[in-house]
Image (cartoon, rainbow, N blue to C red):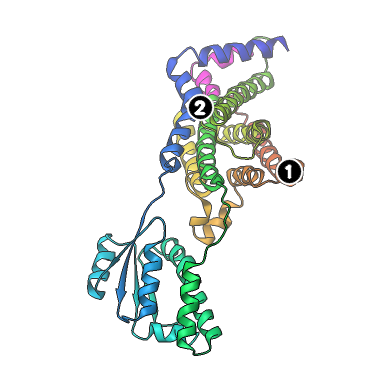
Amino acid sequence: MKDILWLIQNTLSMTFRKRKNVIMFLLMPLVGIFIALLAYGGNQTPTLTVGVVNQDKGEITDDTIQFLKGLENVKVSEVEAAEGKSQITSGKLDSVITFEKGFSESVLKGSPDHIEISSIKGAAVTGFVKSYLYQYINNVATISRAADGNQPKFEQMVKDYQQSGYKLATHSVEDASKNKLMTNQAIGFLIMIMMMSAVNLSEIILLEKEQRTYYRLLSTPINARKYLFANVVVNMIVMTIQVLITLTIMRTVFDMGVNVSIWEAAFVMILFSLISVGLSLVIISFANNRSAAGALQNLVITPTVMLSGCFWPVEVMPKSLQKIAEFLPQRWTLDTLTKLQEGSTFSGLYLHYIILFAFAAAFFLIAVYRFSRNNTTQNFI
């Protein structure tokens, strides 16, 4: 035990003697927080620019346009059909609503038709407009059916509907979705840094073999098992510090990490640190020198981090890539944290913890097999 403690102390001392290592191992994870804040930290509500093409010229159409102009965060302007298409293409308008001839008549008949909404920005824009516009049109159509063709009665009912007063109590609620996206991106960057840190710390094995220090250590009572165990402990110490620093600053300084206890999140990330250490030993076991280890690191870590959704939501990727992501430990780590954010109990996610532990165990078993098979801990080419 004394030998292992000496190895741990010596490795930590050698590692953090260089200032660049302090920056890389302890401060780099914080960069992910600032990236997440830049990407999702804006609180300004965007204004939607909508162009209206009025080909119907009916009274109901005019009332509908006035309703649109009364919506918050929506700027409405009347345009010609050809002008509307060009302004959508140039980005001056987010959407164009065309009221074709016969729109008013269709609403009076109780079957709204002759309306078209176009946008190159997709459902994110059209869905917002439809949610308000279609509700208003359907209400007017319902009034028309209730009036049963009695025009004066219909006009009076519409007027009463437009001028009716409602008692509405409003309460502001926090937009948890944006905070969740910020948290996931910050954690995703932390995952990448943890994996890279694990490989860099495990490369100390190759470095000391190149410098022949490893063989001098084996001439003492220290054996290969103690040496590898000490390296694993150093890895775990560094990554635990990374996790605690990042989560603490996220929670106390930037108020990130909605509905997640810092200790629950720390448990998940420390469990992932075991996976990172196991994977780093696998990479080292397949490498004969530090250059090969660096190449394997780029080949394994970068693609899997991107596929697992650490940099962007996994839902934006094709279905085939999403299926591949289900076999990656980074995906399971993010999914566990997401479920905790969504209100799942800590104990209820025991299957996720078992799967994460299984990933770690599998990597450690592969590394042990490789080390014993090619005798990497004894020889260096």
The percent coordinates of residue 371 (x first, y second) are 64, 31
In-image side of 276 versus 294 (left or right): right
Q: Give the mark nearer the N terminus: 2 vs 1.
A: 2
The one of 139 and 199 positioned closer to us in this rendering = 139
**Magenta highlight range:** 203-219
**Foreground label between 2 and 1:** 1
Q: Name the residue under label 1.
A: 345
Q: In this view, does 231 lie above or below 141?
A: above
Residue 292 seen: no
Q: Residue at x 24, y 68 (%)?
A: 86
Q: Which residue is drawn at 38% across and 51% down?
A: 46
The alpha-carbon separation of the residues under discs 2 and 1 comes to: 35 Å
Q: In this view, does 152 lie above or below 194?
A: below
The percent coordinates of residue 381 (x first, y second) are 51, 27
Q: In this view, does 113 lie above or below 312?
A: below
> Looking at the picture, which amino acid does disc 1 mark?
Thr
Neighbours of disc 1 within 10 Å: few (<14), some (14-19), many (20+): few
Q: In which quarter of the image is residue 68?
A: bottom left
Q: Which residue is drawn at 45% across and 43% down?
A: 40
Residue 139 seen: yes
> Looking at the picture, which amino acid does disc 2 mark?
Asn
Q: How many marks?
A: 2
Question: Any mark on residue 215, and which?
Answer: none
In-image side of 194 versus 229 (left or right): left
The one of 136 and 185 positioned closer to us in this rendering = 136
Question: Any mark on residue 200, and which?
Answer: 2
263 inside magenta stretch: no
The percent coordinates of residue 51 (x first, y second) are 31, 67
The one of 202 and 192 positioned closer to us in this rendering = 192
Confirm or deny contact between disc 2 and disc 1 (CB under 8 A). no
Q: In which quarter of the image is residue 238?
A: top right
In-image side of 251 versus 366 (left or right): left
